[in-house]
Image (cartoon, grey):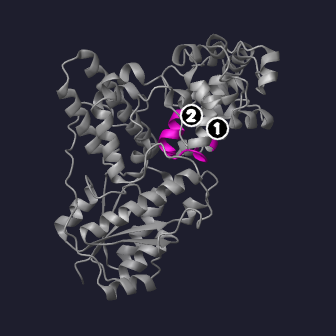
Amino acid sequence: MSDLIIFWHRRDLRLSDHVGLTAARKASSQIIGVFCLDPMILHREDIAASRVSYLIDCLQALQESYLNAGSQLLIFSGSPAKVIPNLAKTLQAQAVFWHQDVEPYAKSRDVDVAQALKEQGIRVETFWDQLLHSPAEIYTGNEKPYTVYTPFWKNWITKPKSESLSQIANLTGLSVAEQEIATQAGAIALPSAKDLGFVWDGAWLLPAGESAAIDQLEAFSSSAIFDYQEQRNFPAIDGTSRLSPALKFGTIGIRTVWAATLTAFEQTRSEESQKAIQTWQQELAWREFYQHALYHFPELANGPYRQQFNNFHWDENYDRFEAWCAGETGYPIVDAAMRQLNEIGWMHNRCRMIVASFLTKDLLINWQWGEKYFMQRLVDGDLASNNGGWQWSTSSGMDPKPLRIFNPITQSQKFDPEGEYIRQWVSELRSVDSEDLVTGKISPIERQSLGYPQPIVDHNLQQKEFKRRYQLCKGD
């Protein structure tokens, strides 16, 4: 048997701060990367053209990184349960390494791949990489998974965090003859998103690839992180890290991200800045909380955590849903956010909460419609975070005080007081007076002249109706 180790990449598209590759490099210098374009993922109804396009660009960057390190990243298309074992057998690999995941499909798929490899006598090594703490590390005092964020955070923050790992280098790849064998086994040239049937012409929030992610982290952690507490809720301000696509695809390691927060903390003596840094650390913990939740409660992917919400009476109003999707609700902050999503495949986090609340609490439309639409558009679309965020906004999730209703007018006045964000994304409203813009008090005549719709619902009436239905589904 050769010394070859295959590393199967999924959401870890980088060579630095990489748990699995670091372990593989200790065992052998002959390592190749493999990525499998899985039709079970690419043909899902909730796939986004933006996300596929971003993935392809990340893979192109990773291929270049492998070449620079002396090896190759091979691309395949097909079921990983067939592709990976077949390639390992054909190349007589000694082992296949990969990182574990929290999503139900990934867990099931990985079991099938591991079983097929073991039947062939090929060693399997798996690791946790995308989390600072795996789902087995954080439990309540009763050895149960957490279902409330605050106690999770209090436990999580006390745990020692692993340090960032060095860049993988000096690899040995496949010989020319072995590359020909890999081609016969199904290796293909990296296709474009268009080749796969996806067209995306939008601009990226963050350029694809490892180097761009590192540059963005350095820029954020040397500047905006110190004002994060104050500026994170204002969508017109570039006050967030914008690293969500990088974290989704793993073009940056979470240990590298954490180390940057510690460095920033040490560089300031301001209590206000230190509090801002901790607030961003708490956002990283929210990401882990939702991933732990999905791992331990896979049924979240298909329904509400609070079972009584299965009895909630939602309106199946397709016209209102389409108006929400298109950013044509007549509520400027909601419409600005949805148009941002549609144009660049990303939305500010404050706005994600606003539009989710509006869909469920104002339009009384099932949160799963909105969850799916987000996944069909978001470049950073992640099942755990998206599902967790939607369930939190809907009041169906893991929240000790679930009944929250966002007033879109109040949210505009507080977080976009001059209407800068609204004007950026709702072009027909750019000439409207700021006070009228953020309060929504645009006259029917002006709305008509500008080609902007009347509000499709009355917020005050709709929130009362939501509360009535909420009490009914609770059985109170």
Residue 375: in magenta span:
yes
Residue visible at 60% across and 42% down in the picture: 343
User: Furthest residue to the front?
Assistant: 431
Task: Give the mark, 1 or 2, whose residue is nearer the N terminus.
Answer: 1
Residue visible at 46% across and 67% down in the picture: 36
Residue 130 visible: no
Q: Of residues 293 and 243, which is closer to you in this image? A: 243
Could you tell me which quadrant the N terminus lies in?
bottom left
Q: Residue 1 carries which label?
A: none
The residue carrying mark 2 is: 390
User: Furthest residue to the bottom?
Assistant: 177
Magenta stretch: give its range. Answer: 373-389
Could you tell me which quadrant the C terminus lies in?
top right
Quadrant of the rendered structure where residue 231 is? Answer: top left
Give x and y (percent) for residue 272.
28, 16
Q: In this view, does 322 lie to the left or right of 210?
A: right
Q: Residue 370 carries which label?
A: 1
Q: Residues within 10 Å of mark 2 (few under 14, many from 20)?
A: many
Residue 178's place in the image compared with 268, above or below, is below
Residue 443: in magenta span:
no
Give x and y (percent) for residue 428.
70, 27
Give x and y (percent) for residue 236.
50, 26
Residue visible at 64% across and 54% down in the picture: 45
Secondary structure under the numbered disc 1 in the rendered image: helix
Do residues under tags 1 and 2 come within 8 Å of each other at their CB atoms? yes
Secondary structure under the numbered disc 2 in the rendered image: helix
Quadrant of the rendered structure where residue 147 is? Answer: top left
| Three-letter code, disc 1 | Gly
